[in-house]
Amino acid sequence: MKTTTNDSWLYTISSKRKLIDFNFKEIWRYRDLLLLFVKRDIVTVYKQTILGPLWYLIQPLFTSIIFTLVFNNLGNIQTGGIDPFLFNLAGITAWNYFRECLNKTSSTFTSNKAIFGKVYFPRVIMPLSITISNLLKFVIQLIIFLVFLCYFWYQGMDISFNPKLFLFPVYVIMMALLGLGLGMIISSMTTKYRDLTILVGFAVQLLMYVSAVPYPVSEAKAKFPEKVAILVEYNPLTQIIEGFRFMLLNTGTFTWFGFIYTFVLSIVLFLIGLVIFNRTEKSFIDTV
């Protein structure tokens, strides 16, 4: 006797995919797992450390002090009337979020090969959880920056917010998309080329110095060779950091061209990274 059934599969896991597949629907289905990984990242990041979450505060404060001593006091970098420490703290706060997203997502496949080889879920959940969990660190460092901002204002410094402050959430999204997009591209490449893991840490340090973190764009135009100044000015990270300072400290430059250019580029890099990442996840286990 032949038995037939009309039941259909709920999920089908296959290595065959479209050329361009963003996989947003499946990511949404695994949103509970995404939240679980976010919670794990937040809880375990400083577990079994003496200072714990205080490292969120120590790192940007000490870096700002060093930048102030080296670039402003020794190098005579001008900050447009803003206290150098506050100027540097603003740039470092923005830069740290991008750097954390890029560094941690760029090793997604190699760092999680054990769990990826045992159970299926959309692998992009992992870098997404890193980007979201790093928002907590960014918010804490932003609060510290605002505390110092209030202190300097109380001491009589002329500080005013810019009317374009409403764009602040967009700048945060652009930082996240750039870090996530570049991180997914690099992570996909490190499955075959392990040297990139070493190169990323070195390259990110160099990238900071061409992203106007320790100096304003006006100083780059005045003191750098023309080609280097153009590279700094049109670096999308420069646009984000300069915009961050422009909104919170009302110093620096802002152009709608730079804003739109950075916004479009961040979306394009994210989508390219997502496509490459999704195509790599089906075969990476054979190479890592």
Image (cartoon, helix red, strand yellow):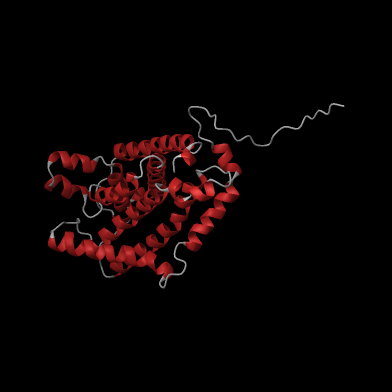
Return the residue nearer the eye: 38 or 107.
107
Give the residue drawn at x 49%, y 41%.
285
Q: Quadrant of the C terminus?
A: top left
- Is 110 drawn above or below residue 21 in the view shown? below
From the top left corner, tell me how far across and down residue 19 is, in percent.
48, 27
Give the residue drawn at x 56%, y 42%.
27
Across the whole image, how many numbered discs are drawn on residues?
0
| 240 lies left or right of 70 | right
| 48 lies left or right of 34 | left
Q: Quadrant of residue 6?
A: top right
Give the residue drawn at x 34%, y 67%.
58
- Is 121 drawn above or below residue 138 in the view shown? above
Q: Quadrant of the N terminus?
A: top right
Residue found at the far right of this picture:
1
From the top left corner, tell me how far across and down residue 127 is, in percent.
46, 47
Does residue 205 show up? Answer: yes
- Is 127 drawn above or below residue 19 in the view shown? below
From the top left corner, tell me how far across and down residue 107 is, in percent.
41, 48
From the top left corner, tell me how far across and down residue 272 is, in percent.
41, 34
Return the residue nearer the eye: 242 or 156.
242
Does residue 149 show up? Answer: no
- Is 158 drawn above or below residue 246 in the view shown? below
